[in-house]
Image (cartoon, rainbow, N blue to C red):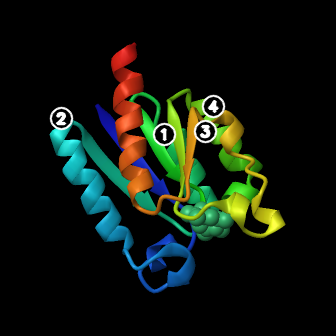
Amino acid sequence: MKILVLNGPNLHLLGTREPDVYGLETLDGILARVEARARELDATVESFQSNEEGALVTRIGNSRGHYDGLIVNPAAYTHTSVALRDAIAACGLPCIEVHLSNPLAREDFRHVSLTAPVCTGQISGLGGYGYVLALEALAEITNRK
Ligand code: DQA
């Protein structure tokens, strides 16, 4: 199983970014936890972070045939990006949307996810552990086939 983990804008700042909301774990720390779990599951993980919508759209658009599934935290683009939504729908891969925080417990503008309806599932509010759970979910889903 080969998985692509995509992180959107400002997530490279984890560790110092609004720690009361996002915690103190860095993105590298989260990815190290995902990679450790991937080794146990005999999976491989690649990751990509960008602040740019187009770069994320391009990575998703090129993912078909190269990965078995996606883990995506679109960050602020969750609430704005039709382009990301269409890219996820078009790639045809199982995709788990992850949020560190629980957007439903925050400002109203975070209550709508444009991307979640085209994802297989969504995990929110569990911090970096949500990425590990997303990997386990993809292992379960791809084994079912
Ligand atoms: C986030 C939630 C989004 O609303 C926010 O814009 C982010 C991070 C999360 O992981 O909790 O940048 O996706």
Residue at the image position 24 percent from the left and 44 percent from the top: 38
The residue tagged 2 is 42
Indicate the quadrant where residue 43 lies: top left
88 or 112: nearer the viewer:
112
Answer whether labels 3 and 4 touch (C-beta < 8 Å): yes
Answer whether labels 3 and 2 touch (C-beta < 8 Å): no
Residue at the image position 39 percent from the left and 45 percent from the top: 133
The residue tagged 4 is 90
Disc 1 crowd rating (10 Å Cα; few below 14, some 14-19, many 20+) is few
Horizontal side of 123 relative to 117 (left or right) equals: left
Q: Rounded to the nearest whole Å, what is the CA distance between mark 2 and mark 1?
A: 23 Å
Q: Is residue 35 visible?
A: yes
Q: In the rendered image, which quarter contains the N terminus?
A: top left
Indicate the quadrant where residue 79 lies: bottom right
Q: Is disc 1's CB within 8 Å of ligand 1?
A: no
What element does badge 3 sit on?
A: helix
Point out the frontmost of discs 3 and 1. 3
Q: Rounded to the nearest whole Å, what is the CA distance between mark 3 and mark 2?
A: 25 Å
Point out the frontmost of discs 2 and 4. 2
Q: In the rendered image, which quarter contains the C terminus?
A: top left
Q: Rounded to the nearest whole Å, what is the CA distance between mark 3 and mark 1?
A: 11 Å
Amino acid under label 3? Ile
Mark carried by residue 88: 3
**Marked residue nearer the N-terminal end (3 or 1):** 1
Q: Residue furthest top?
A: 145
